[in-house]
Amino acid sequence: MSRNEKAARLAAFFVSEVYGVPHLQLRELRRTMASIAVYSVKGGVGKTTFTVNLAWCAATISRRETLLWDLDPANGSGFLLGVDPKKKRTAGSVFDQTRDPSKLIQKTDFPGLDLLPADESIRNLDRQFNRIGKKKRLAKITERLTKDYDRILFDCPPVLNEISAQTMRAADLVIVPLPPSPLSTRAFEQVIAEVRGSGKGHPPILPVLSMIDMRRTLHKDARAANPSWPIVPLASAIEQCAVERRPVGAFAPRSPATRSFAQLWTAIERKLARR
Ligand SMILES: Nc1ncnc2c1ncn2[C@@H]1O[C@H](COP(=O)(O)OP(=O)(O)OP(=O)(O)O)[C@@H](O)[C@H]1O
Ligand SMILES: [Mg+2]
């Protein structure tokens, strides 16, 4: 076992001991599969950071077999999970079904967490979907993957096109990170309107205030305006994920940042359990 793996197991043990009990109870209640998209039309709001940390929580705290499916050609999730890209650019072949996704899935250092990585070949995924002409292609592939995974998380690019429309059809729950501002409520309403406009019906959407700093008046006001929304703090430990190339729980298990992702994950599991 590598040093990284040992550290990952220790951190996982600590976090699951501290935060895990309600999750295990929930797991006993329902062993259902769910797919979760982290989405916003806006760039840089924390989507990739959320996806990686929540996927880690799913695998570690809830002990779910978890797959993170990166739909953004920038491959940020793979980077944050410390998984180096393969030379061959093959991510796009999953969508035209010339390759079985299981052939492209890579293990991470974290038990129970696998990655379906992105690469340059999905730079025009929008056009590829339109060319294929199957509106539920992503949903159908996701459904097949549930044979092997309890939780599938999508890291979405900041777009409003056929990629987001397919993601909405494939997801059971959509998490929208919103940086705090007096306009957060409006920004969230915009996302809902955009999602509604992209097709008939849509999955439940959970807004989350992201990068919140309670020392700032504007952030406090945004929190006060939306007291029921979960929060993820602005934290240097979270920024460090990009240096460590690990989820925050794996290198700072006792930090407030880890606690906030664990609490957010609890809220997500509860929402899923109520379906
Ligand atoms: N809670 C946080 N505290 C501090 N820094 C954060 C936090 N969340 C995200 N960041 C930082 O903000 C930047 C953008 O985050 P991230 O890449 O997750 O956003 P994104 O929405 O996926 O962006 P894109 O739309 O480009 O894919 C990164 O540098 C990340 O480290
Ligand atoms: Mg991203």
Image (cartoon, helix red, strand yellow):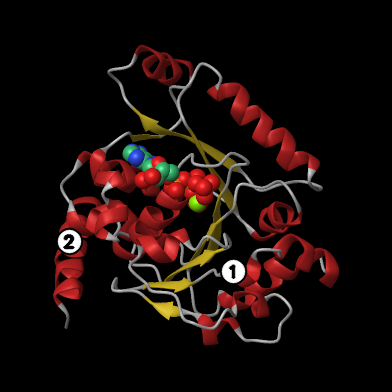
Q: From this view, report whether residue 175 is shown above or below residue 20.
A: above
Left or right placement of residue 211 versus residue 122 in this view: left
Would residue 91 appear left or right of 114 to someone viewing this image? right
Amino acid type assigned to the residue bearing label 2 in the image: Ala
How packed is label 1: few (under 14 Cα within 10 Å), some, or many (20 or more)? some
Of circles 2 and 1, the one toward us is 1
Residue shown at 42% from the left, 13% from the top: 221
Please give the label number shown on residue 203: none
Whichever of labels 2 and 1 marks the residue nearer the N terminus, that label is: 2
Question: Where in the figure is residue 257, as x and y percent of width and height?
Answer: 26, 42
Ligand 1 image-quadrant field: top left
Give the SS element for disc 2: helix
Residue under the point 60% across and 27% down: 187
Q: Residue 240 location, x and y as percent?
A: 26, 49
For label 1, the residue is 120
Measured in 3D between alpha carbons, the distance from the residue under mark 2 to the one under mark 1, in whole angstroms, is 33 Å
Check the image and report above or below for 243 versus 143.
Answer: above
- In the image: residue 267, left or right of residue 261: right
What residue is at 21 percent from the left and 63 percent from the top?
A: 12
Residue lying at 26% horizontally and 52% vertically, measured from the top left? 248
Residue 10, picture quadrant: bottom left
Q: Which amino acid lies under the numbered mark 1 shown in the image of this protein?
A: Glu
Image quadrant assignment for residue 36: bottom right
Residue corresponding to mark 2: 11
Image coordinates of residue 228 in percent, x first then y, are 45, 27
63 and 159: which is toward the camera: 159
Proximity of marks 2 and 1: CB atoms separated by less than 8 Å = no
Q: Position of residue 76 (x, y in %)?
A: 45, 59
Name the quarter where the N terminus is drawn.
bottom left
